[in-house]
Image (tube, helix red, strand yellow):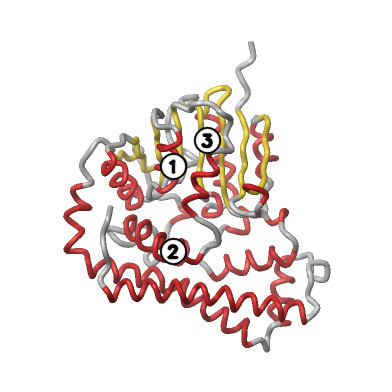
């Protein structure tokens, strides 16, 4: 949906994005100081907590590091508030259009007896003010303001092209019944729609506000998606009813026990011969000790309470434990992000 921010809101979003870009430059300066301090991957402590103390201790007098930490903290804690303020400035103009897009072929249903999982209660993921459902239009705010005016400008690579590209990792076949776990506001869902235009798509998420934005996206284009408010580890959907189960950058938002449940639910809902395609952050085991420190340090200060649990898993091994075959895990295009896990449910014997 096309819209324009007011000058004040646009300036605020541009400022926080530019600050984020300057934060990256400060981090580069900090890395040079790390090197000068003799901290290399082979000299860092093996234990992650000890390593955090080791690096922070070595950088105690670093102006670049303390400025970088201050900038990162301010941007992380403030970008959501600025986005909400920017939305409120144009709310009267666009709210009628948002409400109109709630009507159309795509509807939202809720799993009977659904309750927000305990791991999501009271958590402000990404330090989003109030959490995923903290504002009645949080789905729109996050998808169209935060993602397009902040994350897209500050995150390495094209975050939307990456979503398209990961689907090319699937075998060359037409998938017709697709389940997306952690559908969020529909950015990845629309890439699935483009890739498999004849597929029946079911999107599952725990946030009704984000699914409302996915609904608007679908209705604006005349697409029919089945959107379900439910946990990805317990969807209640029929067994063996999909030929593809996929997610994009969901796993680091949930604890290890839930990740295992999500993969088990994917196996249950896949038909024999169906495919699993998951993407997420780079696991610790695929990074050197310094890169691992930086990813964990960013998670600690960025509102990512389950990052460490997720990044510590070997997802190809988890796939094999559950019965998947042909399991592989690797970085897209040989790069560390996004990290792909792909596997297949075996054909039924006989």
Distance from the alpha carbon under mark 1 to that under mark 2: 27 Å
Answer left or right for 269 relative to 348. left
Q: Position of residue 62 (x, y in %)?
A: 66, 86
Give me the residue at 50% from left, 29% from top.
Answer: 269
Distance from the alpha carbon under mark 2 to that under mark 3: 25 Å
- Give the secondary structure at mark 1: helix
Q: Position of residue 84 (x, y in %)?
A: 31, 68
> Which circle's residue, 1 or 2, is located before the other in the chain?
2
| Residue matched to label 1 | 191
> Is disc 1 surrounded by few (<14), some (14 to 19) or many (20+) residues within 10 Å?
some
The answer to which quarter of the image holds residue 9 is bottom left
> Which mark, residue 343?
none
Taking depth in this image into account, of 232 and 138 the one nearest to the observer is 138
The answer to which quarter of the image holds residue 42 is bottom right
> Which circle's residue, 1 or 3, is located before the other in the chain?
1
Taking depth in this image into account, of 184 and 13 the one nearest to the observer is 13
Image quadrant where one finds the C terminus: top right
Distance from the alpha carbon under mark 1 to that under mark 3: 23 Å
Judged by depth in the image, the label closer to the viewer, 1 or 2, is: 1
Answer left or right for 51 relative to 1. right
Report the residue that reaches farthest toward the top. 350
Q: Position of residue 101 (x, y in %)?
A: 22, 46
Taking depth in this image into account, of 23 and 60 the one nearest to the observer is 23
> Which circle's residue, 2 or 3, is located before the other in the chain?
2
- Give the secondary structure at mark 2: loop
Give me the residue at 50% from left, 27% from top.
Answer: 243
> Is disc 2 surrounded by few (<14), some (14 to 19) or many (20+) residues within 10 Å?
some
| Residue matched to label 2 | 124
Answer left or right for 115 relative to 181. left
Judged by depth in the image, the label closer to the viewer, 1 or 3, is: 1
Give me the residue at 57% from left, 79% from top.
Answer: 68
| Residue matched to label 3 | 265
């Amino acid at each position: 949906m096309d819209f324009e921010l007011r000058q004040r809101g646009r300036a605020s979003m541009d400022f926080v994005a530019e600050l984020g870009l300057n934060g990256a430059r400060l981090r580069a300066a900090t890395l040079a100081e790390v090197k000068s301090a003799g901290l290399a991957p082979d000299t860092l402590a093996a234990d992650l907590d000890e390593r955090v103390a080791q690096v922070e201790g070595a950088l105690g007098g670093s102006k670049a590091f303390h400025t970088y930490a201050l900038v990162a903290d301010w941007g992380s804690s403030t970008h959501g508030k600025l986005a909400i303020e920017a939305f409120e400035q144009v709310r009267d103009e666009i709210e009628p259009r948002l409400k109109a897009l709630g009507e159309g072929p795509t509807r939202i249903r809720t799993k009977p007896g659904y309750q927000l999982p305990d791991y999501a209660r009271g958590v402000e993921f990404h330090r989003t003010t109030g959490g995923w459902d903290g504002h009645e239009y949080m789905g729109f705010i996050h998808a169209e303001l935060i993602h397009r005016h902040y994350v897209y400008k500050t995150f390495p690579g094209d975050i939307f092209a990456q979503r398209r590209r990961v689907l090319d990792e699937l075998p060359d076949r037409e998938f017709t019944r697709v389940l997306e776990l952690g559908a969020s506001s529909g950015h990845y869902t629309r890439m699935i729609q483009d890739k498999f235009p004849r597929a029946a798509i079911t999107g599952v998420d725990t946030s009704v506000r984000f699914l409302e934005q996915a609904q608007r996206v679908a209705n604006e284009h005349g697409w029919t998606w089945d959107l379900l408010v439910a946990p990805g580890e317990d969807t209640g959907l029929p067994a063996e009813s999909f030929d593809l189960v996929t997610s994009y950058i969901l796993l680091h938002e949930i604890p290890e026990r839930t990740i295992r449940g999500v993969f088990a639910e994917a196996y249950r809902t896949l038909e024999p011969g169906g495919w699993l395609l998951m993407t997420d952050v780079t696991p610790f085991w695929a990074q050197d000790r310094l890169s691992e420190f930086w990813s964990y340090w960013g998670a600690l200060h960025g509102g990512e309470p389950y990052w460490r649990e997720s990044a510590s898993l070997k997802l190809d091994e988890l796939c094999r434990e559950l019965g998947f075959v042909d399991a592989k895990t690797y970085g897209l295009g040989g790069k560390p992000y996004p990290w792909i896990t792909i596997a297949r449910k075996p054909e039924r014997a006989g």
